Image (spheres, rainbow, N blue to C red):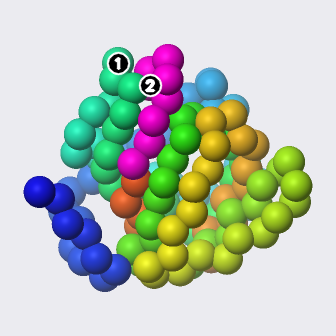
Amino acid sequence: MYSYKPGDDVGDLDDWPFDNPDSDYVIKQGDPRASGRCDLGGPGHVTRFGIWRCTKGVFECTEQGDELMTILTGRCRLIDHADGKINELGPGDSILTRNGSRVTWDVIEDVTKVFYAHKADGF
């Protein structure tokens, strides 16, 4: 069983560079750095579950898969390019992003999230 609560120590994470061409990352401000791990699933699977962390900064990307995430630590704004909606997120807040959505991540305080994602044609 996996259990994560706001403020939990999530353990070691690997460097996850912003280099996936399908995500088309564009750094807009600062020097954000991401790290993470998949606790279940991952490349070659249709689902994945894990932890992701990012340092302060602003970047755009195209979301890969439908993803339910819950913020464990930090604060961010997630801006959906389709409708301009700004979602302010902090510890305990959850949001669902859709496969192919273009979004801006404005990471105000280093963020750690737990995520569960599904992509019908696999990651």
Does the segment drawn in magenta span residue 117?
Answer: yes
> Is residue 58 at least partly visible in the picture?
no
Q: Which secondary structure lies at badge 1?
A: loop
Residues at circles 1 and 2 in contact by the CB criterion of under 8 Å: yes
- Is 82 drawn above or below residue 123 in the view shown? below
Q: Is residue 58 above or below residue 38?
A: below
The answer to whether one can see residue 97 in this image is yes
Q: Amino acid at mark 1?
A: Gly
Residue at horizontal 44%, vertical 79%? 92
Side of 49 where 103 appears, left or right: right
Q: Residues within 10 Å of mark 1 (few under 14, many from 20)?
A: few
Residue 19 shown in magenta = no
Residue reaching furthest right?
83
Where residue 63 appears, as percent x and y from the top left, is 62, 40
User: Which percent across, then down, holds residue 47?
Assistant: 37, 33
Is residue 98 found left or right of 2 in the rendered image? right
* Quarter containing the C terminus: top left
Q: Is residue 36 above or below residue 32?
A: above
Q: Secondary structure at mark 2?
A: loop
- In the figure, is residue 59 to the left or right of 10? right
Q: Quadrant of residue 105?
A: bottom right
The type of residue carrying mark 2 is: Phe
Q: Look at the image and give the residue range highlighted in magenta.
A: 116-123
Q: Which residue is mark 1?
A: 44
Residue drawn 51% across and 68% down?
94
- Residue identifier under label 2: 123
Residue 22 figure quarter: top right
Q: Which residue, as the protein is rendered here, is positioned at the far left?
A: 1
Residue sitting nearer the eye, 54 or 118:
118
Q: Quadrant of the N terminus?
A: bottom left
Q: Residue 73's spot in the image, x, y percent?
A: 42, 77
